[in-house]
């Protein structure tokens, strides 16, 4: 029988699909890895699984223990899902700017959500960093995964995402493209593909305009979520990455909308960004039909319906590709 014993067994082994429509003039083959098909809806399920099982093996998590992490996004969902299945309590500390919807998702999985004020300095005792540190110290049996320092993040991608891509492409992948947040995805997957190919696979990072990875001297705010940083996390190893391609909010969001409309892929803004970076690299290096680029798409577009997929939000932020919908046809009696 082919029946999984727990939803966590369904993490990983996501499919690759070719892009045909958004590639325009690019001649290289482009395939995307669809990570929203993970049970929690993103690539972060992979790191949650390994972080929790390794913490158990190392005796950092004991039965009845509590996991405390300051996160509200995809990592939270992955941790909530795996923690629940392994029988742990889960507390997320989130700043009050995080939407009700995101809090509700974590609570739906049975997690406790502690809300902290956004308008305080990181070293203020009320900040979400301070509160999560304090809870992790005060609660007996508490464990804080700390995704920006936990090397099981990159390791999860070295042991799952990398081999999956290598096998699914019959070892023919020539370029791997991914966005950089904690850097775990690109570091782990990229390192595996370099090791497996004798360093011939080129690893390309995608980065929002305003993030440190592509331009440390021009760090500023941007709208793409889940990627880019204003510091270098321990989980990012730049030596694995051959080049970092910068993408603007406008370019990323326009592509995100095209992916839904033309390829049937309802994905998030960091996915659109990664595809734009792949196309820019393909043009820059004049890649041809023998090149096979694999682009990792981290999450689903469902979490961005009121932003990237809202015409009025796009228009009010000055972004393009707004569909001018014609008025509904009049019925002729
Ligand atoms: N896209 C989204 C939507 C994410 O949530 C993340 C994780 N922060 C990333 C991309 C980047 O992945 P990583 O942290 O492995 O670099």
Image (cartoon, grey):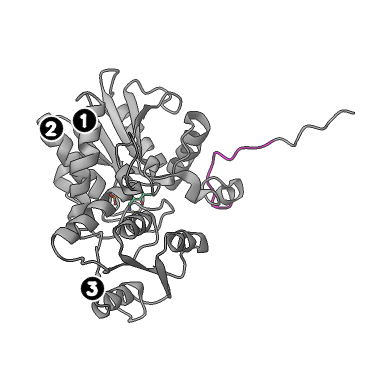
Q: Nearer the viewer, residue 145 or 330?
A: 145
Q: Are marks 2 and 1 in contact (CB under 8 Å)?
A: yes
Residue at 32% in and 35% down: 295
Placement of the N terminus among the 4 image quadrants: top left
How busy is the neighbourhood of tag 3: few (under 14 within 10 Å), some, or many (20 plus)?
A: some
Judging by the rendered image, the residue that carries numbered circle 1 is 166
| Residue 284 drawn in magenta | no
Query: For the residue labelled by badge 2, is the local secondary structure a helix, a strand or a loop?
Result: helix
Cα distance between the residues tagged 3 and 1: 39 Å
Asked whether the beta carbons under mark 3 and mark 2 sit within 8 Å of each other, the answer is no
Give the alpha-carbon distance from disc 3 to disc 2, as whole Å: 39 Å
Q: Tell me if the residue at label 3 has its CB under 8 Å from ligand 1.
A: no
Camera sees residue 208? no
Sequence-first disc among 2 and 1: 1
Q: Which numbered dot is residue 196?
A: 2
User: Which residues lie in the magenta part?
Assistant: 316-325
Q: Residue at x 27, y 56 (%)?
A: 217
Q: Nearer the viewer, residue 169 or 285?
A: 169
How far apart marks 2 and 1 lie (CA) works out to: 8 Å
């Amino acid at each position: 029988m082919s029946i999984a014993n727990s939803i966590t067994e369904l993490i990983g082994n996501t499919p690759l699909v070719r892009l045909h429509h958004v590639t325009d003039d690019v001649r290289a083959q482009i395939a995307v890895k669809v990570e929203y098909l993970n049970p929690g809806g993103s690539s972060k399920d992979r790191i949650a699984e390994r972080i929790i099982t390794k913490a158990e093996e190392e005796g950092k998590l004991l039965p009845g223990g509590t996991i405390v992490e300051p996160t509200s996004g995809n990592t939270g969902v992955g941790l909530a899902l795996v923690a629940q299945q392994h029988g742990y309590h889960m507390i997320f500390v989130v700043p009050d700017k995080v939407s009700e919807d995101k809090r509700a998702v974590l609570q739906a999985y049975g997690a406790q959500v502690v809300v902290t004020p956004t308008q305080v300095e990181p070293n203020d005792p009320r900040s979400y960093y301070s509160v999560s540190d304090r809870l992790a110290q005060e609660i007996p049996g508490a464990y804080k995964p700390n995704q920006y320092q936990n090397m099981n993040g990159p390791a999860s991608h070295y042991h799952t995402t990398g081999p999956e891509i290598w096998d699914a492409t019959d070892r023919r992948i020539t370029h791997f493209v991914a966005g950089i947040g904690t850097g775990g995805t690109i570091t782990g997957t990229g390192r595996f593909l370099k090791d497996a190919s004798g360093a011939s696979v080129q690893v390309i990072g995608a980065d929002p305009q305003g993030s440190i990875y592509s331009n440390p001297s021009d760090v500023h705010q941007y709208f793409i979520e889940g990627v880019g940083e204003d510091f270098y996390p321990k989980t990012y190893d730049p030596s694995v990455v051959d080049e970092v391609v910068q993408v603007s909010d406008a370019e990323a969001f326009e592509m995100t909308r095209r992916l839904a409309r033309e390829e049937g892929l309802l994905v998030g803004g960091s996915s659109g960004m990664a595809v734009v970076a792949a196309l820019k690299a393909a043009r820059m290096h004049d890649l041809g039909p023998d090149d096979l680029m694999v682009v990792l798409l981290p999450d689903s577009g469902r979490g961005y319906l009121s932003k990237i997929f809202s015409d009025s939000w796009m228009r009010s932020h000055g972004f393009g590709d707004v569909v001018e919908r014609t008025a509904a046809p009049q019925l002729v009696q």
